[in-house]
Amino acid sequence: MNEGMQMTFDFAACAEGEKETKNPLKNKIDFAALLSVTMANPNGDPLDGNRPRVDLDGYGEISDVCIKRKLRNRMQDLEKAVFVQSADHRGYDLCDSLKTRADKLFKTLGEQKTEKDVCAKAACKKWLDVRSFGQVFSFRKGGKGKSERESDDSVSNPVRGPVSIHQAVSLSPVDVRSIQITKSVNGEPSEGRSSDTMGSKHFVQYGLYLLKGSINVQLAKNTGFSAEDAETLKECLRTLFVNDASAARPEGSMEVYKLYWWEHNCASGQYSSAKVHRSLRVAPKDGVRQPSCADDYVITLESLPNLEPEIIDGV
């Protein structure tokens, strides 16, 4: 891609990629996962001092952006090519920006690097997260030295990926706790202890979160998302918190309790995603006011004729 040039890619052209897909996705898929959180901060809110995200009614939340980051990390762990990479994960290619990574691919296309359809197809074929979640490729069309604001022709064309993911919400209000922490040394030279030796740590005492998502067959055709890609996504969901430990999320504090995977018998689906997701019902057991583990909940599945989910134990 020429420096200073803005290009947008028509990912509808990737429908041609179906010819190259050995095993194209034929049936709609819905999925849901129960995520167990114990003494951890599953997703800090930067506008609230990094406290765990909660809504106005006290229910915990994990943003879809956070979940997709973890899925991309698992894809990297499984040695899949990922466009939006994390620098601290295995397989990082040392590119310092998304543009650098995109240029590295598009330069291999030779004279075709300015053709939108060719670039779109190449991006879909190479990067699993692009053909899963979609992506916006946007670069300036103005010459060198021009800012994006100065370019009158700056445009972008969003890519619609087949995999849609809701933000995860806890099934009961969560108890968010805070503790004061200290460290034994100063961060900067100082007489006595400086203020940076004090801090706070926030965590959810316990929460069971419900994550919901779907895979659209028509959009999968557009990006070349295959049945094998769906299996990879399933494995990434099952092992969502592998290699994700940190001070905020100690090893063992985050767990995929159950994963539910519904594969319909047609492209449009036998039922709407909303109806499928509603068929999974989770509620605290009678007499339990503040659940402290997954066993404090009753999980029931409403039977949908000719559509039975695969129920998988998570990690």
Image (cartoon, rainbow, N blue to C red):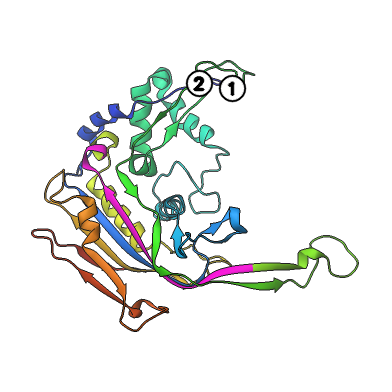
**Span colored in magenta:** 201-219
**Residue linked to disc 1:** 149
Left or right of 56 on screen, residue 210: left
Q: Is residue 217 magenta?
A: yes
Q: Is residue 313 magenta?
A: no
Specify the farthest residue to the front: 57
Residue 208: tell me if it is visible.
no
The answer to which quarter of the image holds residue 116 is top left
Image quarter where the C terminus lies is bottom left
What's the amino acid at mark 1?
Answer: Arg
Q: Earlier in the sequence, mark 1 or mark 2?
A: 1
- The residue sitting at 25% across, 58% down in the picture is 277
Image location (x, y in percent) of residue 107: 46, 26
What's the amino acid at mark 2?
Answer: Ser
Left or right of 231 on screen, residue 206: right
Task: Name the foreground residue: 24 vs 56.
Answer: 56
**Residue linked to disc 2:** 154
